[in-house]
Amino acid sequence: MRDFFCEIRNTTVMGLMLMGASAMAQMTPVGTWHSFDEKTGAVKSEIVIEESATGLRGYVSKLLKKDADQKRLCTECTDERKDKPMLGLEIIRGAKKEGTEAVWSDGKILDPENGKEYALKMTPIEDGKKLEVRGSILFIGRTQTWTRVK
């Protein structure tokens, strides 16, 4: 009988460890996210964030607005992304984790609507189900909340 309870305890401990590891794995911006139109609240695009040699990078993988022109170009961009297709456009560059906190910064985020780049800060929230994405110049900026795609 004692072996039976030890086995249950070991199985429970192992399950809790795996659940904890799974939750910790989600506390990163790496993954696929939905961004939203700030005016209407409608899903706007799908963004994929992945690791690279220079930090995290993110690109537009899908345009999801009903009226989105799938062949749209970044006409407002002023660097090498000028007139490149929005699909596949790299909008996040160089973000790195800040110490032991679940915060990534030191990168840049591009707003393709106006072609401007902003200092970037990303913070996973709600056990990694959502991502606060802040773009700013000095102390002025705005924060969007993206939702992880399952």
Image (spheres, rainbow, N blue to C red):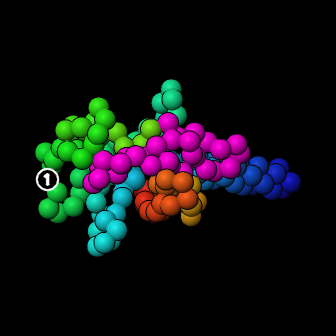
Q: Picture coordinates of residue 45 (x, y %)?
A: 29, 55
Quarter of the image where one finds residue 36: bottom left
Quarter of the image where one finds residue 91: top left
Q: Nearer the viewer, residue 26 or 10?
A: 26
Q: Is residue 5 visible?
A: yes
In the displayed structure, does residue 32 sit left or right of residue 140?
left
Circle 1 — which element? Answer: loop
Relative height, residue 97 to residue 6 (above, below): above
Q: Residue at x 35, y 48 (%)?
A: 116
In the displayed structure, does residue 70 sit left or right of residue 80?
left
In the displayed structure, does residue 110 sit left or right of residue 128?
left
Q: Amino acid at mark 1?
A: Asp
Q: Which residues are magenta?
A: 94-121
**Label 1: how many Cα within 10 Å (few below 14, some 14–19, many 20+):** few
In the displayed structure, does residue 88 sit left or right of residue 2?
left
Q: Picture coordinates of residue 149 (x, y %)?
A: 39, 55
Q: Is residue 22 visible?
A: no
Q: Residue at x 19, y 38 (%)?
A: 83
Q: Picture coordinates of residue 67 (x, y %)?
A: 14, 62
Q: Picture coordinates of residue 39 (x, y %)?
A: 31, 72
Q: Nearer the viewer, residue 112 or 101?
A: 112
Q: Is residue 91 magenta?
A: no
Q: Nearer the viewer, residue 103 or 138?
A: 138
Q: Residue at x 31, y 65 (%)?
A: 37
Q: Is residue 115 magenta?
A: yes
Residue located beneath label 1 in the image: 69
Q: Residue furthest top?
A: 53
The prevailing secondary structure element of the residues shown in magenta is strand
Q: Nearer the viewer, residue 135 or 7?
A: 135
Q: Residue at x 36, y 57 (%)?
A: 34
Q: Residue furthest bottom?
A: 40
